[in-house]
Amino acid sequence: MNHFSELVTQVDKRIAAKVQKLVELLDDPDLQPYVAEFQHRFESRKASVSPIAPNGLKGTRGVREAVRSLEFPDPNNVTVNGVLDTLSAANFKFTSKDHARSVRDALYELSEGEGAIFKLVKKGEAGKASVYKRL
């Protein structure tokens, strides 16, 4: 099992490195005309969430991949409940019984390390939700 965990970690790191490189390329001034063209082409397309975990992934990893694909109305105010509502509206099939915990864990994992795509803005306390910002 330990070997499998290491393999999953390696895959996640590779994906994170690719996402980081993509973000750098999207910010490259030389590529801005092309980025603008792609944005224009796909502007009318609505982001959708697969109703099942991608590639049959179970647990937090499937939720994590679904969260990665989401677009947020306010990327500076992302909460567990907001993500949970969006996934539920898209009929995402959770593999765990505690959906909120899966989303919370996914947001936490996506806010850690070099390939983080979220930043914890305000840690929840006393019944208040944590707030994340999409990077």
Image (cartoon, helix red, strand yellow):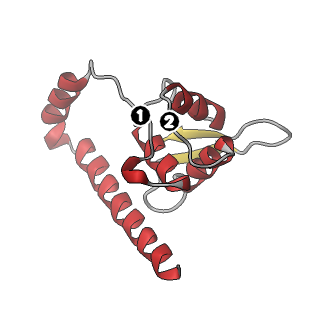
Residue 103 falls left or right of residue 127? left
Residue 104 in sight from this viewpoint: yes
Q: Position of residue 23 (x, y in %)?
A: 31, 47
Element carrying mark 2: loop
Question: What amino acid type should be assigned to the residue bearing mark 1?
Answer: Val
Q: Nearer the viewer, mark 2 or mark 1?
A: 2
Above or below: residue 2 compared with residue 111 = below
Q: In which image quadrant can residue 42 be found?
A: top left
| In this view, 104 is above or below 90 | below
Residue most extreme to the top:
44
Q: Nearer the viewer, residue 57 or 20?
A: 57
Which residue, given by chain and number where applicable, does mark 2 sit on?
Answer: 92
Q: Is residue 69 left or right of residue 99?
A: left
Q: Residue furthest right?
A: 126
State whether residue 76 appears in this view: no
Residue located 44% across and 41% down the image: 52
Mark 2 to mark 1: distance in Å? 7 Å
Can you say which quadrant of the picture contains the C terminus?
top left
Q: Residue at x 44, y 69 (%)?
A: 8
What is the x, y in percent for residue 14? 34, 65
Q: Residues within 10 Å of mark 1 (few under 14, many from 20)?
A: many
Q: Return the disc, 2 or 1, that comes first in the chain's sequence.
A: 1
Which label belongs to residue 49? 1
